[in-house]
Amino acid sequence: MNETFQANGEVLERRWPALWARLQGEDLTALSPRVTGCGSTLSIDGVQLTSRYDRVGEARLQADSLALDSTVVHLYGTALGDLQGVLLERPALRTLQVYIVNSALFVMVLGLLDQRLWLGDPRVELSLAGEQVEMALPFFALPGEMVLADDFNARMRDRLVSETHLAFNNRHFAAAQPHLLQRLQETETLVRSDPDVARLFDTLQGREVLVIATGPSLEQHFAALKAIAARAERPLIICVDTAYRPLRKQGIVPDLVVSVDQLISERYLPPDDSQAVTLVYLPLVPADVLQRWQGPRYAGYSASPLFDAMRQRLPRGSLHTAGSVLHPAVDLAVKMGARRITLFGADFAFPHDKTHAGWLDSELGPSVKAARYWLHDGHGQRVKTQLNFRSYLLELERFIARHPQVQFFNTSRDGALIAGTHYHPEFVA
């Protein structure tokens, strides 16, 4: 223990004794810090904590993204303390809530740099990011630590990254792009003639629903699902569009299939023998796919402004969308009246180095080799994923939290750990 660490530790022990006791147990051996740049920043596994040229200048630029008159600011990450110091210069600031995103990294910095200026400021509150269920606003998330987040704080990291990318992710539907308007023109006649998805709402009277996505773990349950589907009395089966073909190949006929994607085709929704299957769709699905579907069709919208003009001309029910077709499938089950929903293939990850059930690697998106991110599976281990999958998981968890009247079950520990769900005893050992 050097003098810098001891001095910083005395402040922490006085202000946050429980947190300090926990931090002292951190293992620093996995960190390989390197001092780099004329501004003397730290690099961990090639990730710089701050600018290597002008740390304070960067901190002022970061602070400028937050309103000057903010009385409360939430800062995720501690880095080298530069942004904390700049924010505390603001006379309007009453509370600076700092969240540790990598505990070992924070402890390491305590032994390298004097952090007492911000640690000792009475306006500062300090805690672990992972102790919070949801992110708080207004916030700033330090970029380097979004990459270096440790396991305990990873779920909050995912929320922060998703929120940071939200405006970029929504840009595609923020404006009425010509090709999307053209698609709506092509499907409007069908929307006009097809029944409203709202007719399906409140029709289940508490019947259990199985919602089937296309995650790799679905393959573990094909035999069980085939047996369930053959029962005279069974749960309602809803699947997403990309799960439809693999299910039919296994002899499993779902009751409803949900499709929202403008890029869907008959490759995913083959019309043959679809007479007994109801298709619930949003008007971005190609008109030729809809026209060839042999079973009943129901049209609906999402809350996207893209549908506002058509919504005024042709009112239809709305389904929740947040990037994945699984979201409207689950929302449909809830709005139909399900009080018990069991999820299959809701992995949001690539367990066993596979991307999807029933499809070859890269057929439905990037190859598993391109996966650069991770999340925790039901075994508590890291599993490969894509950045957008983590956002989809987050939005499903938020949806589940908003519907406490519904019981949600997951059927595999190999995919993502989904907050708010229980593991179904029939399918998970």
Image (spheres, helix red, strand yellow):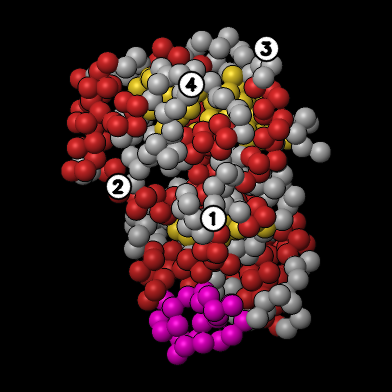
Residue matched to label 3: 232
Residue matched to label 4: 277
* Residue drawn at 30 percent across, 32 percent down: 288
Disc on the earlier residue, 3 or 4: 3
Residue matched to label 1: 361
Q: Disc 3 to disc 1, how far (Cα)?
A: 36 Å
Circle 2 sits in a helix, a strand or a loop, which is it?
helix
* Residues under numbered marks 2 and 3 in contact, where contact means CB atoms less than 8 Å apart: no
Quadrant location of the N terminus?
Answer: bottom right
In the rendered structure, which amino acid carries the disc numbered 2? His
Picture coordinates of residue 285 (x, y %)? 33, 34
Circle 4 sits in a helix, a strand or a loop, which is it?
loop
In the rendered structure, which amino acid carries the disc numbered 1? Asp
Residue 382, numbered label: none
Picture coordinates of residue 63 (x, y %)? 39, 64
Q: Hey, which residue is sitting farthest bottom in the picture?
A: 38
* Residue drawn at 42 percent across, 54 percent down: 164
Disc on the earlier residue, 2 or 3: 2
Extent of the magenta region: 33-56
In the rendered structure, which amino acid carries the disc numbered 4? Val
Determine crowd level at label 3: few under 14, some 14-19, many 20+ residues with C-alpha closer than 10 A. few
Instruction: Say whether residue 36 is magenta.
Output: yes
Disc on the earlier residue, 4 or 1: 4
